[in-house]
Image (tube, rainbow, N blue to C red):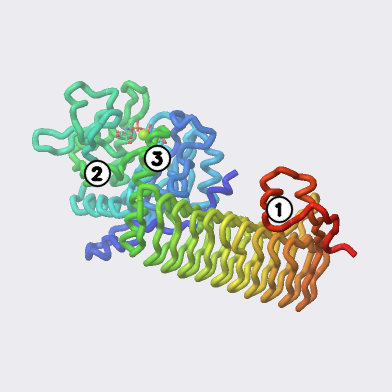
Amino acid sequence: MLSHLAYKVAEPLWNRPATTAAVRGRAVKQLDLAIVLAAGEGTRMKSELPKVLHPIAGRPILDHVLLATAPLNPAELRIVVGASREKVGAHISANFPSATQVVQAERNGTGHAVQLALESAPHLGSVLILAGDTPLLTSVTLQEFFDAHIDMKAAASVLSAHVPDPFGYGRIVRDADLELERIVEERDANPIEREIFEINTGVYLFDIAVLRAALAGLKSGNSQGELYLTDVIEIIKSSGKSVVAIASNDYTETLGINDRSQLAECTAIMRDRINDAHMKNGVTIVDPTTTWIDAGVEIERDVTIFPGSSISGASSVASGSVIGPRTTLDGVKVGAGAKILESRVSESTIASGANVGPFSFIRPGTTLHADSKIGAFVEVKNSVVGEGSKVPHLSYVGDATIGSGTNIGAATIFVNYDGVEKHQTTIGNDVRIGSDTMLVAPLTVGDGAYTAAGSVITEDVPAGSIGVARAKQRNVLGWVLRKRAGSNSAESARKAGATEGSTKVQGEA
Ligand code: UD1
Ligand code: MG
């Protein structure tokens, strides 16, 4: 069920530049706990798949949040799961085994979720709280938020953002001195508060002891009858401790996903971010709006990607390669200087200097060795094509091993399936398979062997031999003039000197 979500958990590209406090010369302050809230039902997604497991750029929404949090190195990570906790929990266990899962059986609000997450948690230190549905947050922003929280010696900090359309978000209410006073939810806000464009992003840092005390004072007297985490701000403020709202300068980072439209919006922003990072690294992307690259994909400099291409899964592309236009690579390792044009390739390796396409289909388990060529309208499955070997036109290669320097003639079919089982074909080095050969597996064609064009080869062909397996040709002279009299063909034949008289058959004794 979750197999399509399996991938190497690598740090996202945009998290890589060292931006930690230590690097910027600040005192390193340990984050003691991070809590990710993911117990929501995600009903507006209208999906069998839990909301936080919907993929963006090849990894689930939740994973983006967890990977952005990871560089802050929290001593402990707790994830609150509720609705669909079986699937979400299984995913967390498989991919983030060191995280602690906290079950919120009843959805009683964000304050309730954090109360549960703090049970048996450390009593001192700092806690970062964030939602599991904001995949665009970066570790850079989270680290800066943490640094600011420490610098300001705040008991509670809220990451805020100025958004063009604040509808639906909690609003940041500031006092006459522009200091954070409280957060009011859309549904509970008065008309004046609804005019506030600074919103609560749902990312917070707290002193754990202060938060714990404030949570005990939460009440559910609001429009949803829930315990709102946001209410702790007012409680902490009224106890005389410092609370601050720190504005993010890129509100797009804080967008949350509640429905499929927001999923598409965030996916497009993620696409642009990934493409920008690759372009900064020296990759030419001719049309970034139609180029889709998964978060974990590695691309070296001087690769060119033409429009309409996507590179997904555990793929990597080495320097100087040309991909596209309209090419799909999924789980493909591409060597230096390879060219893949208008083709679809999955779970395969394409070595340096190899050429594919246009219009070819390379299926899982294929290895194309250096400088080999798969030309137009060729399907290859679970096969090895040796160094410098070519399958230039209109062929099917399945379950085969082809040596080096071999040429497979146009329209050759590797007949690997007998209707019940698949069989293997082995072709040696420097072989010449004639056009339109049927190679009926299991079969071995030895080094330097040939097959005659149009042959149906059912027996092994020894090294250095030519396999010929086709009917001998006969020419029935004058046939067109007799049987198609009056046709253009007959007329042309007559002009060329053919006569209908003879009934001789060339090629027969
Ligand atoms: C919340 C904030 C709002 C903020 C917005 C930012 C509150 C009361 N409001 O509103 O100020 O602007 O986020 O996106 O916190 N969750 C649980 N258990 C629950 C309820 C929620 O784990 O009982 C999780 C959800 O899965 C989600 C997160 O908490 O990941 C936020 O909950 P959601 O219902 O989306 O809150 P918003 O109405 O968006
Ligand atoms: Mg939300």
Q: Point out residue 234 in the picture as x, y percentages from the top left corner.
A: 23, 33
Q: Residue at x 49, y 68 (%)?
A: 335
Check residue 133 in the rendering and tell me which mark sits there, or answer none.
3
The Cα–Cα distance between marks 1 and 2, rounded to whole angstroms, is: 96 Å
Amino acid residing under circle 3: Asp
Decide if residue 441 is in sight here: no
Point out the residue furthest to the right here: 509
Q: In the rendered structure, are the residues bearing label 1 and label 3 in contact, judged by CB atoms less than 8 Å apart?
A: no
Q: Point out residue 83 in the picture as x, y percentages from the top left corner.
A: 50, 33
| Depth check, front residue: 196 or 497 | 497
Task: From this view, report whether residue 46 is shown above or below residue 329.
Answer: above
For mark 1, give the secondary structure.
helix
Check residue 157 in the rendering and tell me which mark sits there, or answer none.
2
Asked which quadrant contains residue 461, the reply is bottom right
State ligand 2's quadrant: top left
Question: Which marked residue is nearer to the observer: mark 1 or mark 2?
Answer: 1
Amino acid residing under circle 2: Ser
For residue 484, side relative to residue 127 (left or right): right
Amino acid residing under circle 1: Arg
Decide if residue 407 is in sight here: yes
| Depth check, front residue: 122 or 25 | 25
Find out if the beta carbon at label 3 lies less than 8 Å from the nearest ligand 1 atom: yes
The Cα–Cα distance between marks 1 and 3, rounded to whole angstroms, is: 79 Å
The Cα–Cα distance between marks 2 and 3, rounded to whole angstroms, is: 20 Å
Q: Residue at x 71, y 53 (%)?
A: 494
Q: Earlier in the sequence, mark 1 or mark 3?
A: 3
| Depth check, front residue: 341 or 312 | 341
Residue under label 1? 494
Question: Which marked residue is nearer to the observer: mark 2 or mark 3?
Answer: 3
* Image quadrant occupied by the C terminus: bottom right
